[in-house]
């Protein structure tokens, strides 16, 4: 069969992996964002019992590749504790585990990006440290954090492809299974690449527009 005949036949099968990829990304980044905020507070805390574990967690996660984390949670821990891991909770947990460390640094940098005068103005009005943080600083920091958080979402969407290693039927897994059936890798991986581009390119343009309005950094594409 020609390239286009194979593509037409297997495109619907591979396309079925897109909702799984999107769902895994969203379900992973939501708890990752919540825990990342807690970690950011820990990094900024003066209490060693909070600051040190948060710093160690962030350094460990950012210092190890996601593929190693997937193998660790998908195979090493189950082997060590003699259990069979459920695919979806494991997949979502790995993405949340990974993204939380990057999002923590996004929040920490965003809070640090708010001018010091805002703290001083809030305290001069009689606000406590926590009141100043939640009522004055965080609303401004969240605006700064939006573009790099968008970067992290796009990065996590692409990184979710590594979940094929634990057999989750997402986009990359379906491309690999299609290749094993039709032995036409040039067709299957072209479809997979096209589908990733359909979602990531528009998202990257949105993030760039946001970066034009707000300041911030983030994990590079």
Image (cartoon, helix red, strand yellow):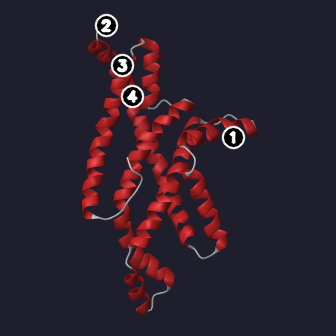
Secondary structure type for disc 4: loop
Name the residue rendered at 53%, 59% in the picture. Answer: 35
Q: Are marks 2 and 3 in contact (CB under 8 Å)?
A: no
Determine which residue is flagged by label 1. 77
Disc 2 from disc 3: Cα separation: 13 Å
Which of pointers 3 and 1 lies earlier in the amino acid sequence? 1
Q: How many numbered circles does the render carry?
A: 4
Where residue 186 is drawn, which disc sits there? 3
Q: Position of residue 210 (x, y in %)?
A: 27, 58
Q: Which mark is residue 68?
A: none
Residue 84, image x, y percentages: 68, 34
Q: For the residues marked 4 and 1, what is the alpha-carbon distance in whole angstroms?
A: 30 Å
Discs 2/3, front: 3
Q: Which residue carries the number 4 mark?
A: 16
Residues under labels 4 and 3: Cα distance?
19 Å
Q: Quadrant of residue 12?
A: top left
Give the CA distance from mark 2 to mark 1.
44 Å
Marks 4/3 in contact by CB < 8 Å: the verdict is no
Horizontally, residue 210 falls left or right of residue 158, namely left
Mark sitting earlier along the chain (2/4)? 2
Residue, far top: 1
Nearest the eye: 59 or 201:
59
Query: In this orientation, which residue lies closer to the viewer: 37 or 105?
Result: 105
């Amino acid at each position: 069969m020609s390239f286009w005949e194979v593509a037409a036949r297997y495109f619907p099968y591979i396309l079925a992996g897109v909702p799984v990829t999107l769902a895994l990304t969203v379900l992973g980044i939501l708890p990752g964002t919540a825990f990342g905020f807690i970690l950011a507070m820990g990094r900024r805390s003066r209490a060693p019992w909070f600051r040190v574990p948060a710093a160690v967690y962030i350094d460990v996660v950012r210092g190890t590749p996601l593929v190693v984390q997937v193998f660790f949670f998908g195979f090493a821990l189950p082997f060590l504790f003699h259990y069979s891991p459920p695919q979806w909770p494991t997949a979502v947990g790995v993405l949340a585990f990974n993204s939380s460390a990057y999002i923590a640094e996004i929040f920490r940098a965003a809070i640090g990006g708010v001018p010091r005068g805002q703290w001083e103005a809030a305290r001069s009005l009689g606000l406590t440290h926590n009141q100043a943080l939640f009522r004055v600083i965080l609303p401004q920091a969240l605006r700064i954090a939006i573009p790099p958080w968008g970067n992290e979402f796009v990065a996590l969407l692409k990184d979710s492809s590594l979940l094929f290693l634990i057999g989750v039927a997402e986009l990359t897994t379906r491309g690999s299974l299609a290749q094993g059936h039709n032995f036409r890798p040039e067709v299957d991986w072209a479809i997979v690449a096209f589908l990733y581009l359909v979602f990531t390119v528009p998202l990257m343009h949105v993030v760039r527009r946001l970066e034009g309005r707000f300041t911030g950094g983030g994990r590079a594409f």
